[in-house]
Image (cartoon, rainbow, N blue to C red):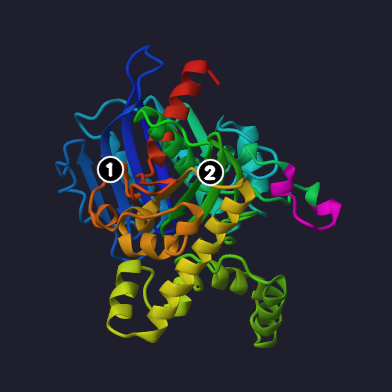
Amino acid sequence: MHLLVINSGSSSIKFSVFATEGKDTGALPVSLFEGEVSGIGSGKSSVQFRDADGRDLSEKASSAKAESSTDAIGLVVKAVTRAGMPRVDAVGYRVVHPGAKLDRHVRITDEVMRDLEDAVVFAPLHDPSAIELIREMMGKLPNVPHYACFDTVFHETMPEVATAYAIPLEYRERGVRRYGFHGLSCESIVRQLREAGIRLPRRMVIAHLGSGCSVTALLAGRSIDTTMGLTPTGGVVMGTRPGDLDPGLVLYLLRQVKEEGGKDWVGAVETMLNRASGMVALSGLANDMREVRKAAAEGNERAKLAVAIFARSVKKVIGGFIGLMGGVDAVVFAGGIGEHDAQSRMEILDGMEEMGVVVNGELNAAKESRLRRISASESKAIILVVPAKEDLMIAMHVDRMVRAGS
């Protein structure tokens, strides 16, 4: 069986083709092809497509244009249905927010699509594009089952004390609660530790740090708390998002934008908080930690402040979760920054020696893209760098649902 996995962003669509091994339900799906349509709507879009050996298969498509998600999906379908490609048997999508009615990965039906439409009120900047993408793909591949996999499902194990907001009951009854995100990443890390033969740490903190960032506390491999809440905007400081804010500040911003004559002042503030805040607002630079660090090293004071605030926000949460769990047995870094930025890891964990968290500088500085330990020998907690494998988790869930006929 061959599975197509779609992982879409605001201006890009990543896609992968996985193969599963016959009737062997214990075998992991194997990645055969990977691709990405980037720069959607920018006038400078491009397509990359490669096989498992890294061979570029995108020569003819590299100059293709994608001015809309419809164009982009057309390019994805063209790539995965070209001559010599295996037939797609099922499609799985990473969907950010399931809303209040969906609490598990599901096959997409008309009823599920209605539930996703209802979820738009919780994620107006994320779910509409996902819904459009799903409808377009289902139209182009109508004879195969389609499945939605949610970033929130892993966090369904959080207790109510961690999910409830201190707001009037009527809103909580409408589904307003802390959902948590990056769940597919966290789940993939737990699975990788088990597969590597590492005894699963009882008390673990996972810091998924990239353009979007979140930190999750786990007991026995199950999420008990996480930084993102109703939406992916809250928590620690991120690339373009501010993390947690005083609610009064949000009200202030709404009043200010309204008084300045903005017609859609709610939309303007929502866009500000999701796309023009965080590291880009602090540094005045692009959403790229490498560029910000380079500027900081050259003496740019705004860049210095940005990296200091970022590290401090993550440090505070990790320290808080260690206190919540009465200690920690493992700290894991994942995501683009978490996996590749040794300096961020060092800054975040600096000063945690009394908590039993000690980094080995030489191991931390090594540039390797694999599961690896970076903790010092005297560290009571193991510190790991683990690549997130969200697409593999989606393929695994789709494979399971297809076999179950769900």
In three-dimensional space, the C-alpha distance between marks 2 and 1, rounded to whole angstroms, equals 23 Å
- Amino acid at dot 1: Arg
Does the stretch in magenta take in 239? no
Callout 2 secondary element? loop
Horizontally, is 287 left or right of 120 in the view? left
Percent from the top left, x then y, of residue 20? Answer: 34, 22
Choose between 297 and 121: the one closer to the eye: 297
Q: Which residue is mark 1?
A: 370
Q: Which residue is mark 2?
A: 151
Q: Which mark is residue 209?
A: none
Callout 1 secondary element? loop
Span colored in magenta: 160-171
Total numbered circles = 2
Percent from the top left, x then y, of residue 136? Answer: 46, 43
Percent from the top left, x then y, of residue 70? Answer: 41, 50
Q: Residues within 10 Å of mark 1 (few under 14, many from 20)?
A: few
Quadrant of the frame with the C terminus = top right
Above or below residue 73? Residue 365 is below
